[in-house]
Image (cartoon, rainbow, N blue to C red):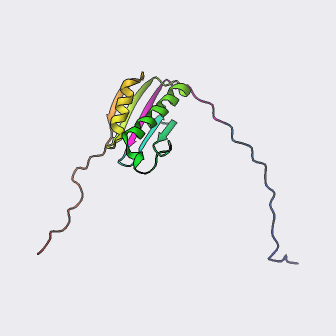
Amino acid sequence: MTEPKDKKIIQEKKAVKPAEKKQARYVPKGRIYLTATFNNTMISITDDQGQVLHWNSCGKMGFSGTRKSTPYAATSTIEQVLREAKDVSGLTEVSVYVKGAGPGRDSLLRVLRNSDFEINKLVDLTPVPHDGIRPKKRRRV
């Protein structure tokens, strides 16, 4: 005999265990990657292998709209993630990689200068166009 099509198959739900919190790693050396766009500032702190330890952005901090693209939002975001990295991971030496031309770029340098992190390297990764895009066709009158 075949089973009717309208019969529902009920699957048993497995009990889901709550996710265990990852243990913080002690990382004395690390890298800071800052992406400063005109609309937001994103910062991620990694170890030397490139695994992200801490990250933050102006949007995650609660700023929205045009307030996300202010130097104040960038400063508070950067201060918070650096404090977290120092307290949780024990970060002391950093290499800084900056990308973009937004307001967070200057804020990062100002915050790092006033902090007690030892800066090994400061690299600018901002992309620069070599030839640019094709110009519009000439206007004929």
**Which x, y percent locates residue 140?**
12, 74
Looking at the figure, which quarter contains the C terminus? Answer: bottom left
**Magenta stretch bounds:** 21-35
Residue 54 coordinates in the image, percent (x, y): 51, 35
Where residue 113 sits in the image (x, y, percent)? 36, 25
Using the image as rendered, state which of residue 7 and residue 84 is in the foreground.
84
Where is 89 relative to 104, above or below?
above
Residue 116 sits in quarter: top left
Say which residue appears at 42% left-offset and 46% top-offset.
68
Q: Is residue 86 visible?
A: yes
- The part of the image, by quadrant, that contains residue 98 is top left
Specify whether residue 29 is painted magenta: yes
Say above or below: 36 vs 7.
above
Q: Establish if 29 lies above or below 54.
A: above
54 vs 70, left or right, is right
Instruction: Look at the image and tell me in which quarter the N terminus lies.
Output: bottom right
Per the image, is 37 magenta? no
Viewer-proximal residue among 140 and 123: 140
In the rendered image, the residue lying farthest to the right is: 1
Q: Position of residue 13 (x, y in %)?
A: 79, 55
**Which residue occupies 80% across, 76% down?**
6
Is residue 49 something that shows in the picture?
no
